[in-house]
Image (spheres, rainbow, N blue to C red):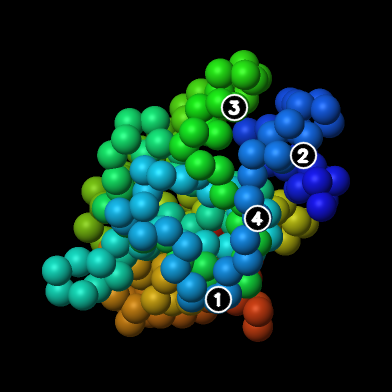
Amino acid sequence: MENVKIDFLKNIELFSSLTDEELLQISNRIIVKEFSRNETILLEEETNEFMYIILLGKVKVVQTTAEGKEIILAIHQAESFFGELSLIDGKTSNATVMAMDESLIAIISKENFYALLYSQSKVLENLLRIFCSRLRESWKRIHILNFREAPKRMKMLFTILSGENGENTPDGTIINLKLTHQEMADMAGLTRETVTRVLGQWQKDGLITVSRNRYILLHHNFFLRE
């Protein structure tokens, strides 16, 4: 089992610079759990107790408004992690984390998290670099809300997603993330009907192609059009 953990941890950016021996020491501090689709992984009141690493699957970070509307703050896929910020400042986050697919999650307690930072300087260096990258991405997401027009919000969202989950092909950039129209609406602060209308117009104009499995191909002219 430890060898399996090490194979997974090698692909995690936070631990990517560690040797196999160092990864073995980390694996002893980690518990691995399975979560079903739509199962809650982390409640708001638990966010300052554990850190989570996605080994397999996909999760979403959501907030619920007073009106009961769900807002998706972020979507994390395999090889990413979350919860470390609350371990550092001790504050809970006003959000819940739920599995979007069958997921395999590694869990690290607050005590073990600090033990890793104190004993592995490379982990701390990686964490600081990742924090800087996430801060820049947060600025981009906030910028989405500065646009009043729905097409501009959607274009900004797709630009961010293509940077995080994009794959370049001869025909354009494929966003390797299956999202429903409602999930896109929740991320852009729009209604599902508006997202459907914008995507339909973009397909008609030849800017994007939506495959049967919901992957979206952004054609080269998508990035050229204002």
Circle 4 Cα neighbour tier, 10 Å, few/some/many (<14 / 14–19 / ≥20): some
- Decide: is 159 above or below 84: below
Residue at screen point 82% across, 52% down: 1
Q: From where the camera sits, is residue 157 visible?
A: no
- Decide: is 108 above or below 42: above
Mark 4 or 2, which is nearer the eye? 4
User: Helix, strand or loop at disc 4?
Assistant: strand
Residue at screen point 29% across, 62% down: 63
Circle 2 Cα neighbour tier, 10 Å, few/some/many (<14 / 14–19 / ≥20): some
User: Helix, strand or loop at disc 2?
Assistant: loop
Along the line of sight, which residue is nearer the eye, 130 or 122?
Answer: 122
Q: Amino acid at mark 1?
A: Arg
The answer to which quarter of the image holds residue 12 is top right
Dot placed on the residue nearer the N-terminal end, 4 or 3: 4
Dot placed on the residue nearer the N-terminal end, 3 or 1: 1
Along the line of sight, which residue is nearer the eye, 75 or 154?
Answer: 75
Identify the residue position indicated by label 1 in the image. 37
Dot placed on the residue nearer the N-terminal end, 1 or 4: 4
Mark 2 or 3, which is nearer the eye? 3
User: Helix, strand or loop at disc 3?
Assistant: helix
Identify the residue position indicated by label 3 in the image. 116
Identify the residue position indicated by label 2 in the image. 10
Q: Residue furthest left?
A: 66
Along the line of sight, which residue is nearer the eye, 83 or 66?
Answer: 83
Q: What is the spatial separation of the Cα atoms under label 3 and label 1, in whole angstroms?
A: 30 Å
Any mark on residue 112, and which?
A: none
Residue 94: x and y in percent read: 27, 53
Q: What is the spatial separation of the Cα atoms under label 1 and label 4, in whole angstroms?
A: 16 Å
Identify the residue position indicated by label 4 in the image. 32
Dot placed on the residue nearer the N-terminal end, 2 or 3: 2
Dot placed on the residue nearer the N-terminal end, 4 or 2: 2
Q: Amino acid at mark 4?
A: Val
